[in-house]
Image: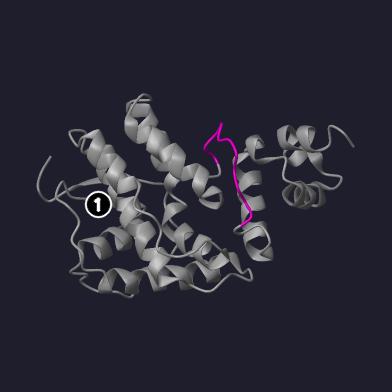
Amino acid sequence: MSAAGVSIRFPAPVSPELTTTNPDSELALFLKCLAEEGRAVVSPQPLADDVDRALSVLRQMDTLARDEFVLDLPEFSAAAAVWAARLFYNLCQFTVCRDIGEEHIVAACRVPCPSSRGPETDWSVDLVLRHLPQLFQLARHLSNADPLVHQMRKIATTWPLSSVGIADLENLQLDSFIGHSGLRRLYADRIILDGDTCRLGHARVDEMLRGDFGLHRELAPTLAAKLFATT
């Protein structure tokens, strides 16, 4: 592994090129590559604390996401977005830098989000953490017994909006975002796209999905079979 860093590939993004040029912050470069190329570039070295340019990239990611989803979405929370960006950088770093000890992994994953939970926080965290399911699959493929996989599961349970597609999570708490119509729509769309049946069982989510399927249950037969099992 070179000091220049390594990269992890994610599904190809649909976002246009960001306007930020020559980011001199490691975190800003990480975010720019993630948004433009679906590539997470990390270094074996600890992440620097300079976040000014990273915040600029995050604000652009927020704008592009609003244009993409065309939904009524919450306000942007800078503190929550930067926290999630740093957390996801660390998770990517731990995935490829296999010599990092469990104690360091646990400590980094336990740093709490500085913003109180609510639609603004959950949306802002999701700007980066929406890539967690793909990273989780990679980490689990490398070693299912890895302590990093356990920490990722805990994060996925804490942030359910961003973790659709990670199976067998229990006690998901949706109260921080499910009352917001735009985030509820985004969550339901992700469940349909991933066919994530473990997300069923919440009354407001199930009601929305039943309305989506209507008479066209063949569009997602596995989800529909569970949704309409008692109707």
Identify the amino acid type marked 1: Val
Q: Residues within 10 Å of mark 1 (few under 14, many from 20)?
A: many
Mark 1 — residue?
Answer: 41
Q: Position of residue 10 (x, y in %)?
A: 38, 46
Q: Position of residue 13 (x, y in %)?
A: 43, 56
- Whether residue 80 is in magenta: the answer is no
Q: Nearer the viewer, residue 22 or 231?
A: 231
Residue 43 as seen in the image, left or right of residue 83: left
Give the image quarter of residue 86. Answer: bottom left
- Quadrant location of the N terminus in the rendered image: top left
The answer, for residue 14, to whether it is visible in the render is: no
Q: Considering the whole magenta stretch, tell me its main secondary structure.
A: loop
Q: Position of residue 196 (x, y in %)?
A: 62, 38
Write the residue at 38% across / 38% down. 151
Q: How is the image coloured?
A: one colour
Q: Is residue 76 above or below residue 41?
A: below
Most extreme residue toward the right, as rendered? 231
Write the residue at 33% across / 31% down. 147
Q: Nearer the viewer, residue 71 or 163?
A: 163
Q: Is residue 16 above or below residue 176?
A: below
Residue 207 as seen in the image, left or right of residue 133: right
Q: Nearer the viewer, residue 211 or 115?
A: 115
Q: Position of residue 167 (x, y in %)?
A: 55, 33
- Quadrant location of the C terminus in the rendered image: top right
Q: Is residue 143 above or below residue 7?
A: above
Residue 123 as seen in the image, left or right of residue 21: right
Residue 110 as seen in the image, left or right of residue 115: left
Write the residue at 66% across / 57% down. 178
Q: Which residues are magenta?
A: 165-175
Write the residue at 78% across / 51% down. 212
Give the image quarter of residue 92. Answer: top left
The answer, for residue 221, to whether it is visible in the render is: yes
